[in-house]
Image (tube, helix red, strand yellow):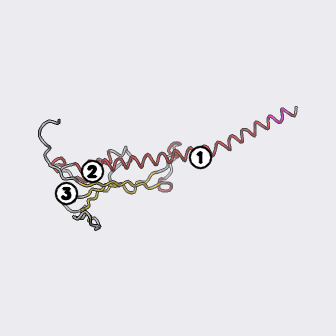
Amino acid sequence: MPRKANSKRRKGAELLEFTLALLPLLMMVFVMLDAAWAIFVKSTLAFAVRTGVRQGITITKTQAGSSDLTTMVKNIVRANSLGFLSDTSKIKVNFYHPPDDPTSTAALVDVTTDATGNNPLNIMQVSIQGYTLGPLIPRLFGLKTPIDKSGTTIAAVSADLIEPSRDVPPKGSAP
């Protein structure tokens, strides 16, 4: 008989030990999910910014037509952000003029507000600043938590040289 009473106690102890082992395991899984979510959002925004720069430096004045290049680039970045950016207010497009001497250590000149900002041989910089990423776990359980209390600010920046190009594409067929 003493053996039966002992086995009931053992079952209760096993349940308690399982619960105590499961809680830290679940916490580790949730932390890994949150980290993976942050990495995914950061890489998506970085891809959107790189695509915006890539498209922006190759759009010629003929292709842009009467559209503003800055607005076009912002819309390209928003379209490639997989819905993380609902508007273009966090997207910044800047133009810089490098020093004429390539060996110079002089600072870049910000020509964003100049009419010649998007001229060839200037540098286009596209950035997303101030994007607040909320944790994923409350979303999984349908909890409404304010992002400002538990969010992480993410930024993505990309820049490239605007290459000189002809407005009219070459005639003839491709090889």
Whole-angstrom CA distance, mark 1 to mark 2, is 41 Å
In percent of the image, x 68 and y 42: which residue is there?
A: 19
Q: Secondary structure at mark 2?
A: helix
Mark 1, residue position: 27
The one of 52 and 153 positioned closer to us in this rendering? 52
> On screen, 4 above or below 99?
above
Whole-angstrom CA distance, mark 1 to mark 3, is 52 Å
Count residues near mark 1 (Cα–Cα under 10 Å), then give few for <14, some for 14-19, many for 20+: few
In percent of the image, x 51 and y 50: which residue is there?
A: 145
Count residues near mark 2 (Cα–Cα under 10 Å), then give few for <14, some for 14-19, many for 20+: many
Disc on the earlier residue, 3 or 2: 2
Quadrant in the picture for the N terminus: top right
Q: Amino acid at mark 2?
A: Val
Q: Secondary structure at mark 1?
A: helix
Q: Magenta residues, as a range?
A: 3-7
Tag nearer the camera, 1 or 3: 3
Tag nearer the camera, 3 or 2: 3
Badge number at residue 171:
none
Badge number at residue 73:
2
Q: Residue 82 at what x, y percent from top left?
A: 37, 43
> On screen, 103 above or below 84?
below
Q: Residue 149 at what x, y percent from top left?
A: 50, 56
Mark 3, residue position: 119
Q: Amino acid at mark 1?
A: Met
